[in-house]
Structures are given as structure tokens and as C-alpha cells.
Amino acid sequence: MTKLIQTEVVGGVATMTLNRPEKRNALTRDFIGEMNEWVTSVSLDESIRLFVIQSTGDVFCAGMDLGEMQSRITAVDPETEWQKDSDVYNDLVSKIFQLEIPTIAVLPGPALAGGTGMVFACDIVLASNNVFFQLPEPRRGITAAMVCPLLLYRTNVSTASYLLLSGKRVEADDALRMGLINELVPKDQLTTRRDELVASILTGSQSALGITKKHLRKMANVDVAGQIRASASVSAEARKTDDAKEGLAAFLEKRKPVWDASIS
């Protein structure tokens, strides 16, 4: 059975590779659980100086597996299941964000929906020039609540509003301009530039890098981890609505959703 993630630690660099390319690295609860366990082990290993998250395939991550999300409707207690899904995702992005070592997201292709949360939780984003970002959740009747704090931390209200409300794709050049990406390179140069960036960061002392990262978060004066925790309930609540059921069903059935126009 193919592992959902590939992991290695070499020379103080921990690399986690998303490995579900046949499903565009869409996130299931088991997939997120495996990542959670490994990120936890990284956080406890004092020999690790840097963390890299990357992926196999042409898409970094398409977000949550909507088929699994839709299947929750038939569970004995769907509301509890939706909350569990939100909680494990909250744990993952919070753990990545709170790592005390530098973190790099390396994107060979697009990041959508919940996939963007793992990217925005990292300190540095390196991407190929065929990348785009998209938060299409409202088109599915749901919300990108837990991505919101990370997006605001990384950019600003204007950029966050555009991504969260429009549902439109943000292409690579625009993403670079908006601050969603730090470096943009041709896809065939991505691995080389990743290695150069890793080597550059490792020239710094471990203590200085850790202190710098802690100071950055303090100066930003935002409790991002707390905001993500609070957003988990918002995310789960949004999945209970009739619009969420309709949006997910429409996506899986490849048709346009019919929204409830009533105002509650």
C-alpha cells in the first residue's frame, strides 16, 4: 500500500512529501492524521533545524476530499464527524505554524482550499510558475474559516477578502505580488532553488533562527493559533447547512448548485 506521506530527515532537514497524486493530494482524515503524527515528531526532535513540506504530482493539494466530506452526512452523528474533521485539520496547520524552526512550503503546482492552509502556515513559500491559489469553499456551500487567520497573518484584509469571497484563481505572478509567494521559479528549477534556499537558511545559527522566528510572531501581535482553534467550530458549523449539502452534492455530480435564497 502506498504511503500517504513520504518523510525523511537528512542533515537536520525534515522533509514531508504529500503522496496522493492520483487524488491531487486531497486531504482525508487519515491523510491529515499521518501528517499530524509526523509533524509532532519533528517538533520533539531537537536535532532538526528546518522543515520542508512538498508534494508529488502536478497539484500541491486540492484541499479536503469532498467525497469523504459528503459521506459524513450518512454517519450516525454527522455533526460530531464534521467537528472531528475540523479538529484534526486545526491540529495540523497549528502545529506547522508553531514549529520553532524555519519552515518552507515548496509548491510544484496549485494549492486550493484547505491545501492553502498548510502553505500559509509556513514561513517561506517557494513555488513554480504554474502555481495558482484558490479558495472555492463558498461555491461548495462551506467556508475556509481556518485558512482565514493564516491568510490575514501572511497578507492583509484586502487580499484575504478577495481570495475568501471571490472564489477566483490567483495566478502565480499575482500571488507573488500579493505576498502569498516569496520566490517564483520555473518548475524545472524548483528542486535546485529549494536546495539553495535550504542551504542559505542553514548558514544561520539554530538559536538565532529560533529566536528570530519567536520574535516575528511576538511583534505581529496576533494569536494565530488561537484564531485557528476558534475557526474550527465555524468550519464545522458551516458544513451542517443545507447549502453545504447541496454544494458538495453539486460538485460531485458535476452540476451547478441551487442555493437556498431564504435569509435566516
Image (tube, helix red, strand yellow):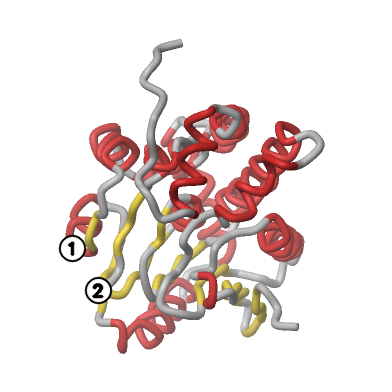
User: Hey, what amino acid is under mark 1?
Assistant: Asp
Residue 179 x, y percent position in the rendering: 27, 52
- The image quarter containing residue 133 is bottom left
Which sits in the foreground, 244 or 170? 244
Task: Decide: few, some or many residues near mark 1? Use Cα within 10 Å; few <14, some 14-19, many ≥20.
Answer: some
Any mark on residue 1, and which? none
Q: Are marks 2 and 1 in contact (CB under 8 Å)?
A: yes
Residue appearing at x 36%, y 66% in the figure: 110
Crowding at mark 2 (Cα within 10 Å: few <14, some 14-19, many 20+): many
Q: Which residue is mark 2?
A: 129
Label 1: which residue? 173
Residue 225 coordinates in the image, percent (x, y): 58, 37
Residue in the image at 60% along x and 73% along y:
16
**Viewer-proximal residue among 95 and 233:** 233
**Residue 149 in view here:** no
Residue at 66% across / 71% down in the picture?
48
Query: Is residue 235 depicted above or below 14 in this figure?
Result: above
At x 81%, y 37%, the residue is 76
* Residue 247 placement (x, y as % from top left): 46, 41
User: Is residue 208 left or right of 161 when viewed as pictured?
Assistant: right
Give the residue type that dot 2 points to: Asn
On the image, the x and y values in percent for residue 134 come to 34, 52
Do we see residue 100 in this rendering? yes
Q: Residue furthest right?
A: 76
Q: Secondary structure at mark 1?
A: helix
Task: In this rendered view, identify the residue nearer to me: 201 or 6.
Answer: 6
Q: Classify residue 231 as left or right of residue 247.
A: right
In which quadrant of the rendered image does the N terminus lie?
A: bottom right
Q: CA distance from mark 2 to mark 1?
A: 8 Å
Looking at marks 2 and 1 on the same chain, the residue that comes earlier in the sequence is marked by 2
